[in-house]
Image: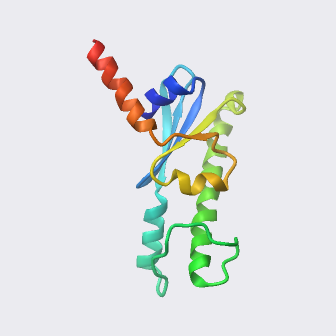
């Protein structure tokens, strides 16, 4: 679904970074074909696992801390979640781009999903965000099916 939308809206090779319950990296060729992907646990799942499995660490708001080094437990957890997750995203994108060095400069990274607005301001690897990407993809596919 996201491949149909990204190909229609943003021509050229692209990686859709879809941040929801799971975080998905969907690689789309310049011809609009889904090339493959990567699935990682979502940020909220990681936060919930930390709170439920680590003694003395509770649930915290998913938000950026005031400083990278937390000066209390809440800010330390938020820093680990936010900056750690940015590192996960940047690392996976670097590995994916390395598999296709011929497209590394032209690959667009399009962010979508419920948590993209939380992470996007803290990294430079996301070229643009599109909150309606999945819905746009559904409309494009429905239009194609209706036309046939």
Most extreme residue toward the top is 148
In the picture, residue 108 is in which quadrant? top right
Residue 94's spot in the image, x, y percent?
Answer: 67, 45
In the picture, residue 72 is in which quadrant? bottom right
Question: What residue is rendered at 64% in x and 54% in y?
Answer: 121
Residue 111's spot in the image, x, y percent?
Answer: 54, 43
Image quadrant holding the C terminus, namely: top left
Color style of the picture: rainbow
In the picture, residue 53 is in which quadrant? bottom left
Image quadrant holding the N terminus, namely: top left
Question: What residue is rendered at 68% in x and 38% in y?
Answer: 98
Q: Is residue 24 above or below residue 29?
A: below
Residue nearest the viewer, comparing 81 with 136: 136
Q: Is residue 93 above or below residue 85?
A: above
Question: What residue is rendered at 33% in x and 20% in y?
Answer: 143
Residue 18's spot in the image, x, y percent?
Answer: 48, 45
Q: Is residue 95 left or right of residue 47?
A: right
Most extreme residue toward the bottom is 56
Residue 40's spot in the image, x, y percent?
Answer: 48, 53
Question: What residue is rendered at 46% in x and 86% in y?
Answer: 55
Residue nearest the viewer, comparing 132 with 5: 132
Residue nearest the viewer, comparing 57 with 136: 136
Residue nearest the viewer, comparing 63 with 37: 63
Number of numbered discs overlaid on the protein picture = 0
């Amino acid at each position: 679904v996201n491949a149909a939308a990204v190909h229609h809206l943003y021509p050229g090779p692209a990686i859709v970074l879809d941040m929801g319950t799971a975080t998905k990296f969907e690689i789309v060729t310049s011809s609009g074909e889904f090339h493959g992907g990567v699935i990682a646990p979502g940020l909220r799942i990681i936060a919930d696992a930390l709170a439920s499995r680590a003694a003395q660490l509770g649930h915290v708001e998913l938000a950026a801390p005031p400083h990278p080094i937390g000066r209390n437990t809440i800010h330390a957890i938020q820093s680990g979640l936010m900056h750690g997750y940015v590192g996960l995203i940047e690392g996976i994108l670097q590995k994916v781009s390395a598999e296709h060095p011929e497209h590394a400069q032209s690959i667009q990274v399009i962010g979508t999903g419920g948590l993209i607005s939380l992470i996007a301001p803290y990294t430079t690897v996301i070229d643009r965000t599109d909150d309606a990407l999945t819905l746009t993809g559904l409309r494009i596919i429905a239009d194609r099916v209706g036309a046939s």
